[in-house]
């Protein structure tokens, strides 16, 4: 069984465990979410080479919709990490590098009935990287950690750290394994 299939099986099992008997809890329903902050695309190493690409920090953001079951949330999100420059094989560049991910996530809120609640989430999806007029799309998975604060029965603000890994990317010029990026954001969730 290849690595992607093993990860998919493990995330599916983990998601089913998170989804226990939480359907009857209060404050459930559909919600919209968005957050903005910083992003760091991790170094990308070329396969069969000592060359690599390093990226400057940049903007990180996400937008999505989800359903809150109480302690468990399911969410579909578009996430972006970008950099305005860096160094590719020892040569500085100033063009934008952009990573867009479409993710399906399952979150668990540890204290959903309290005003402050830490949370953890697992994600699966697809990620597209654009760098130096080249692009590729691949399967991705991720982990998110954060803490939310309920300002009312229908609104929460949160701090979130998200890491996304794409096991393999390939273009006509480069092949990359385990490309990843992280976003640190502040955001809001509105329950309908």
Image (cartoon, rainbow, N blue to C red):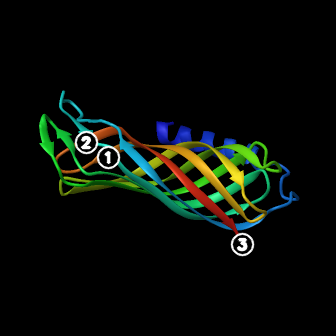
Q: Residue furthest bottom?
A: 192
Q: Earlier in the sequence, mark 3 or mark 2?
A: 2
Instruction: Tell me the distance, in whole angstroms, between the alpha carbons under discs 1 and 3.
Output: 38 Å
What secondary structure is marked by label 1?
Answer: strand
Q: Residue furthest top?
A: 50
Disc 2 packing (10 Å; few <14; some 14–19; many ≥20): some
- Residue that mark 3 sits on: 192
**What residue appears at the point 76 percent right and 42 percent down from the top-left corner?**
110
Instruction: Tell me the distance, in whole angstroms, between the alpha carbons under discs 3 and 2.
Output: 44 Å
What secondary structure is marked by label 2?
Answer: strand
Q: Which of the two marks, 3 or 2, is nearer to us in this view?
A: 3
- Residue that mark 1 sits on: 169
| Residue 78 visible to an observer of this rendering | no
- Residue that mark 2 sits on: 175
Residue 70 to residue 118: above or below: below
Residue toward you, 162 or 174: 162
What secondary structure is marked by label 3?
Answer: loop
Image quarter where the C terminus lies is bottom right
Residue toward you, 76 or 111: 111
Find residue 189 and report its horizontal and vertical position in percent.
64, 61
Find residue 11 and report its horizontal and vertical position in percent.
61, 43
């Amino acid at each position: 069984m290849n690595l992607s299939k093993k990860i998919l099986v493990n995330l599916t099992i983990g998601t089913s465990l998170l989804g226990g008997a939480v359907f009857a809890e209060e404050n459930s329903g559909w919600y919209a979410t968005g957050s903005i902050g910083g992003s760091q695309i991790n170094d990308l190493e070329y396969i069969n080479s000592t060359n690599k690409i390093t990226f400057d920090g940049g903007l990180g953001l996400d937008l999505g919709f989800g359903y809150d079951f109480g302690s468990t949330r399911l969410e579909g999100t578009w996430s972006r990490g970008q950099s305005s420059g860096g160094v590719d094989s020892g040569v500085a560049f100033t063009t934008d590098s952009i990573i867009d991910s479409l993710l399906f996530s399952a979150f668990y809120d540890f204290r959903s009935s309290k005003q402050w609640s830490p949370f953890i989430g697992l994600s699966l999806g697809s990620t597209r990287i654009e760098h130096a007029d080249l692009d590729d799309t691949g399967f991705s998975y991720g982990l998110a950690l954060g803490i939310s604060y309920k300002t009312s029965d229908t609104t929460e603000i949160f701090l979130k750290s998200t890491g996304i890994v794409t096991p393999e990317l390939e273009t006509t010029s480069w092949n990359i394994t385990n490309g990843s990026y992280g976003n640190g954001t502040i955001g809001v969730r509105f329950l309908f």
